Image (cartoon, rainbow, N blue to C red):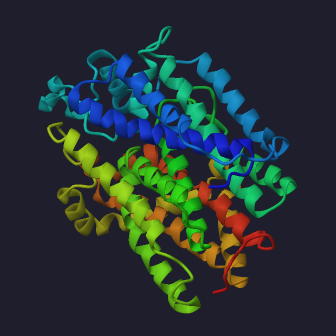
């Protein structure tokens, strides 16, 4: 797959690396082999294999460095704050940091002693991607149980901004890329947010998995656009496989979104094929994407099958789907709270206003990519609403749950606003098909 400059290349490398690593750790957790030696071997396997692979020489490519400066500034500030802080976020400590500590101590993310139901409140069956990275880092010389887990948030934030930067460069000029990336990097909840003092990048300066999930879902959307624009190659399919797998291994909400996006993507491919000719768009790349997702889901479900789940907190269970159909009485309360969140300028700045304007422009210009991104964004918001409808958290205390998590859930899909804005407002450079 062609990359647009160094930030784009390094961001995709990080994303693919952690996805591959999480899959390996899932298998090794089952065998109790997540110790430093085997994990180093897991890390060295891809470069060892690539050494024997013949590749054609590549000519020089532009770095596109100056348009990435706002991202470097935002991430640099988050690194400074991480170095002076410790893990304070309760969800982060109970889910991802604790799991990484288990891995460092026992060689497994699902230690046998955690099969006791009394451990259910620590969610031992929760998706392993972030915990696997933390668990590996905690085994390295000089690691600190509190400070080390925080250092990975900025890496995921940097990768998210790098993929957004590459998408902008691919579709518009360096000047507009600078503006778009700066605007997103310093959107209040991604940049400055008052929570226990000054923070930079909500969830980028803590050990939460919200920024990692936003990274994977943004990558999924960017790849989907390239599929709809006719891109398909063997390296591209391998990339899709790993992105699909990683999206399932970050958080439960990621698995729900990936599975919900399957029918939308399929219908879009069918519609474009009927409109523009049977061979205009192939469904096969989406097949690789969702094959990776389903394989990763089955793998982790098998590895963590004996781990207890707290009542009301497994949204992808049969119980969760049953609660969804009985939770429609919550919908008015949830809808009003979501609308209130959209108008929280101190959290989002003008981001959601940009989404509305970009959707209107995209529809006016009959832009296929913009339409798909609009539907994908609405789907993401719908999945978040469905999660609140089905949740049994603390006996159905939806207000308390939304107060603590609504902003974070919308952050998973907020980067789609940038993709939508670029595709809607900069149609001159894109390879689009009319509606």
**Residue toward you, 362 or 162:** 162
Residue sticking out furthest to the right: 175
**Left or right: residue 61 compared with residue 128:** right
Q: Quadrant of residue 51?
A: top right
At horizontal 67% and vertical 21% (from top left) the residue drawn is 80
**Left or right: residue 141 compared with residue 367:** left
Residue 305 placement (x, y as % from top left): 17, 42
Observer able to see residue 20 = yes
Note whether 43 is above or below 221 in the view shown: above
Quick one: quadrant of the N terminus? bottom right
Note whether 133 is above or below 322 in the view shown: above
**Residue toward you, 4 or 220:** 4
Residue sticking out furthest to the top: 142
At horizontal 74% and vertical 71% (from top left) the residue drawn is 430
Residue 120 placement (x, y as % from top left): 20, 34
**Residue toward you, 76 or 294:** 294
**Left or right: residue 106 compared with residue 8:** left
Note whether 84 is above or below 307 in the view shown: above
At horizontal 27% and vertical 26% (from top left) the residue drawn is 108
Note whether 2 is above or below 363 in the view shown: above
Q: How many marks?
A: 0
Observer able to see residue 352 = no
Residue 241 placement (x, y as % from top left): 43, 54
Q: Quadrant of residue 155?
A: top right
């Amino acid at each position: 797959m062609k990359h647009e400059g160094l930030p784009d290349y390094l961001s995709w490398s990080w994303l693919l690396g952690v996805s591959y690593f999480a899959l390996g750790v899932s298998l090794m957790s089952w065998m109790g082999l997540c110790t430093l030696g085997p994990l180093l071997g897991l890390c060295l396997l891809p470069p060892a294999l690539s050494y024997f692979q013949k590749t054609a020489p590549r000519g020089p490519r532009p770095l596109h460095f100056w348009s990435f400066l706002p991202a470097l500034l935002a991430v640099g500030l988050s690194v400074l704050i991480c170095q002076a802080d410790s893990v304070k976020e309760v969800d982060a400590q109970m889910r991802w940091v604790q799991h990484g500590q288990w891995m460092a101590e026992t060689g497994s993310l699902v230690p046998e002693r955690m099969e006791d139901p009394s451990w259910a409140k620590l969610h031992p069956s929760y998706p392993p991607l972030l915990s696997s990275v933390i668990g590996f880092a905690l085994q390295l010389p000089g690691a600190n149980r509190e400070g080390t887990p925080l250092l990975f948030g900025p890496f995921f934030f940097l990768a998210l901004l790098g993929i957004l930067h590459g998408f902008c460069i691919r579709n518009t000029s360096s000047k507009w890329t600078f503006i778009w990336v700066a605007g997103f990097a310093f959107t209040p909840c991604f940049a400055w947010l008052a929570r226990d003092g000054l923070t930079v990048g909500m969830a980028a300066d803590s050990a939460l998995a919200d920024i990692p999930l936003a990274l994977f879902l943004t990558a999924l959307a960017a790849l989907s656009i390239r599929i709809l624009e006719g891109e398909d190659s063997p390296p591209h399919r391998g990339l899709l496989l790993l992105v699909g797998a990683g999206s399932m291994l970050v958080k439960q909400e990621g698995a729900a979104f990936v599975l919900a996006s399957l029918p939308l993507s399929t219908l879009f491919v069918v519609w474009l094929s009927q409109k523009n000719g049977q061979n205009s768009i192939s469904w096969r790349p989406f097949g690789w994407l969702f094959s990776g997702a389903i394989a990763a889901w089955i793998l982790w479900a098998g590895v963590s099958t004996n781990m207890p789940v707290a009542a009301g907190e497994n949204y992808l269970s049969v119980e969760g789907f049953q609660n969804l159909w009985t939770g429609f009485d919550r919908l008015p309360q949830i809808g009003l709270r979501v609308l209130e969140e959209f108008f929280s300028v101190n959290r989002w700045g003008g981001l959601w206003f940009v989404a509305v304007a970009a959707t209107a422009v995209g529809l006016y210009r009959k832009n296929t990519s913009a339409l798909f991104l609009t539907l994908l964004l609405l789907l993401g918001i719908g999945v978040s609403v469905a999660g609140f409808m089905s949740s049994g958290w603390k006996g159905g205390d939806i207000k308390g749950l939304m107060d603590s998590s609504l902003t974070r859930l919308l952050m998973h899909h907020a980067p789609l606003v940038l993709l939508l804005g670029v595709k809607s407002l900069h149609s001159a450079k894109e390879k689009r098909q009319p509606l």
